[in-house]
Amino acid sequence: MFSIRESYLFAFWTALCGAYEASALHRLLAAAGRWCNRQIDESRILGVLCREGAVARAWSGSRTCHILSFLVNLPGNLLHRLYTAYQRQFDQSFFAGLAFAMGDETAVGESWVIMALWVIPYERWNNAYNFLGFAALLILFYAGSMRRYDSFRLDVKSVGPYAVGMFLAVVLGVALSAYPSLSVRFLMYHSVCLLCVLVTVGAVRNTGDLKRLAAGGSAVVLISSLYAVYQRIQGVEVNKSYVDLDVNAGMPGRVESFFDNPNTFAQVLILLLPIVLGLMLCAKRPVFKVIAAGIFAVGVGALGMTYSRASWVGIAFAMAVAVFLWKPKLIPLFMAGCLLAIPLLPSSILNRILTITNTDDSSTSGRIPLYQAALATIQKSPGTGAGLGTAAVQRFIKDNNLYHGKAPFVHAHDIYLQVWIEAGLLGVVSFVGSMLLNIKNAARTVRHCGDSAARTITCAAASSLCGILVCGLADYPWNYPRVMSIFWFVFALCIAGTKLCHQTEQEEESR
């Protein structure tokens, strides 16, 4: 059978790599990379940012952490007691054995669930699908913990104090909402995300589980991106509500795939494309590397066709962070590659990039009254905000006459402002804290961890979070609950990867 390793292309690539290793350019870039590493290791600013805070240090031993861990694992504990009392009957039962086996493979089940759920067309989508899917995964997890409770438990400790504080703020956002009836349904969306985080972190027990979940996300990128390419081939009508035709004359229609909005589709790609890249880098077989590289290339092409400027900035930042975490010595080469790629970009994309700071663009200038309305809401209700959900915020702003723009107020077009006006001061502090803690833990761990698939995917997940947080400065990714679920899935993937890296490091130290 024909092998990639026997091809002329592979031989040419091997010779090219050998020539590069012996070249002066390699020596120059390696020296620049070593300099970058020294600056990172000796930086006082990065030292402050990467150290563990007092809240994070106290969390694992706190009474709150122990109580919450007990509560979320109580069903599994009770089921385990039942199994212990009737162990012989359960062990002899075919259906019990099947349930236990399926529970042990919760990560496999989750990879199929996300592949099935996150490519459903928008017109057929129902937010209850997410709830049913992750609730089923939770039941599956408890089935696995029934027999293996000691090693199969939901991990509140790794989730961290700030994420718990975020969910508390969400609950308070309903209780203290100016319009509780409008806020209640949004509590379900956040509850689904909590289920996603708990199940994902608990279900990942080894590198294989982590790679399966990454593969599930990669399948979402492939299917949605191929449909976006199909849309482009069929032709996409220019939507005047998405594009200022006076400033972006000649720009083609923006693809949106299954997600109803091109910006939303682009945000999905920001979250999942670095995961695809991480899977490509850690794949052992050349054929899997080629497949992952193909998915990444199609996804990048689809992202370009969304013409989403904030998302382009976000993915560029995500890629820079990925290189910084994975191999800092490649930073000079990455920067050189970015500069060389600029002239190769299509003219429509270059023109779109140039409009980012153009205040004549209505989508840019239209954000100013949105920010003003959000800041006015914070000034009026700084502690509790208007109430959970975009519906409560819209009603609050309308009733208090805080928005004076031309287009209808949908959301603040800034994730930090929107979280504040929905979940109050506790919400925005907990949100920022949870993101920083997760990214800091990942960065600190991968800096002192040997090369492995877990390390590579952790770098990818952390860079995805950085990219979407930068994109969130000019947009609100959580406007669509499905994107919110993907956001928290990547958040959980980062935690799970960090935990695996810690375990690997501890095992090496004990040898």
Image: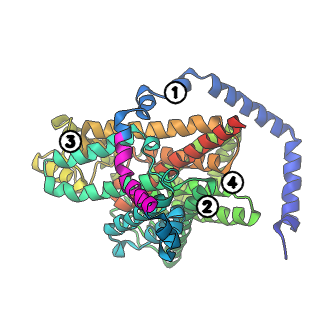
Using the image, tell me which numbered label, if any, was put on residue 210. none
Q: In this figure, which residue is indicated by the disc labeled 3?
A: 385
Question: Which residue is nearer to you in this view: 3 or 324?
Answer: 3
The quadrant holding residue 450 is top right
Secondary element at tag 2: helix
Q: Quadrant of the N terminus?
A: bottom right
* Dot 1 alpha-carbon crowd within 10 angstroms: few under 14, some 14 to 19, many 20 or more: few
| Amino acid type shown at disc 2 | Phe
Percent coordinates x, y for residue 36 in the rendering: 68, 30
What residue range appears in magenta? 67-85
Using the image, tell me which numbered label, if any, was put on residue 296. 2
* Dot 2 alpha-carbon crowd within 10 angstroms: few under 14, some 14 to 19, many 20 or more: many
- Give the farthest residue toward the left: 399
Left of 498 or right of it: where is 504? Answer: right
Q: In this figure, which residue is indicated by the disc labeled 4?
A: 281
Distance between the alpha carbons at the discs numbered 3 and 4: 43 Å
